[in-house]
Image (cartoon, helix red, strand yellow):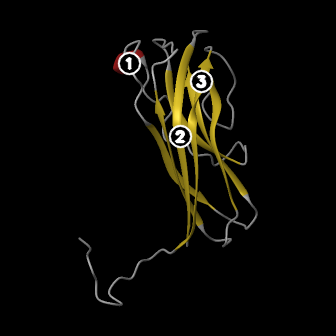
Amino acid sequence: MAINFPEGTQDFPSKVLQVKQGWYSGNQYVTSTGSGASQFGLIYNRVYGDLVSVDLTPLSSSSVIIVQGCSGGSNSNMSFHGTGAFGVVVVVNNGTSNNIDNTDYQYYPITNPFGSGTYLPNTMVQGRWANSGTSTLNFKLKGYSYSENNNQNRVQFRHAHLWLMEVV
């Protein structure tokens, strides 16, 4: 059943200029070893794996890019550690600032909510990128594994999606 509104009664403050999306149907393993410097200007001790890459050429230099990324998980060939965590982030142009990261240590410690053999749930990231030009931007959804004190944490990401919506 559809809802029909009289012509001219809906005045939306934003207009969608374009939508881009990417999908990865495979599996990506990411293993952290409990040490390492910060990458992409984000939390230290994380190891990242590329899940989905989407290019977007903005149509307006004053637009905002709405970003949503999601990945499923599994328990195949995994190893969780009591100091482990996992999640997803979006990195723009492989840069070190203004990347999208909603949490610091998502699902930390990983063994509390999931034990050692549980199928990992979907994990999401969402945010906005304040655009300032019309040059092509590269958005990468990256899965990460985190651990402390030289302990190993191995996570499997699968069936990842990345959606970009340019609005003014």
Using the numbered discs, state the Cα–Cα distance from disc 2 to disc 1 in whole angstroms.
Answer: 19 Å
Rendering coords of residue 32 (x, y %): 61, 18
Quadrant including the C terminus: bottom right
Q: Are marks 2 and 1 in contact (CB under 8 Å)?
A: no
Q: Secondary structure at mark 2?
A: strand
Q: Residue at x 52, y 32 (%)?
A: 158
Q: State the image coordinates of residue 103 (x, y, percent, origin top left).
A: 48, 36
The residue located at (40%, 14%) in the rendering is 117
Residue 147 showing in the rendered view: no
Amino acid at the residue labelled 3: Tyr
**Residue highlighted by disc 2:** 160
Viewer can see residue 52: yes
Q: Is residue 69 above or below residue 14?
A: above
Compared to 18, does 9 lie above or below?
A: below
Residue at (60, 30) in percent of width and height = 43
- Percent x, y for residue 111? 40, 15
> Residue beneath label 3, please?
29
**Separation of marks 3 and 1 at Cα, in angstroms:** 16 Å
Residue 80 higher or lower than 65, as above or below: above
Q: Point out the residue furthest to the bottom here.
A: 7
Q: Amino acid at mark 1?
A: Thr
Q: Which residue is mark 1?
A: 118
Amino acid type, callout 2: Ala
Which of the two discs, 3 and 2, labels the residue nearer the N terminus? 3
- Between the C-alphas of marks 3 and 2, the distance is 13 Å
Classed neighbour count for the residue bearing mark 1: other residues with Cα under 10 Å, few (<14), some (14–19), many (≥20):
some
Quarter of the figure with the N terminus:
bottom left
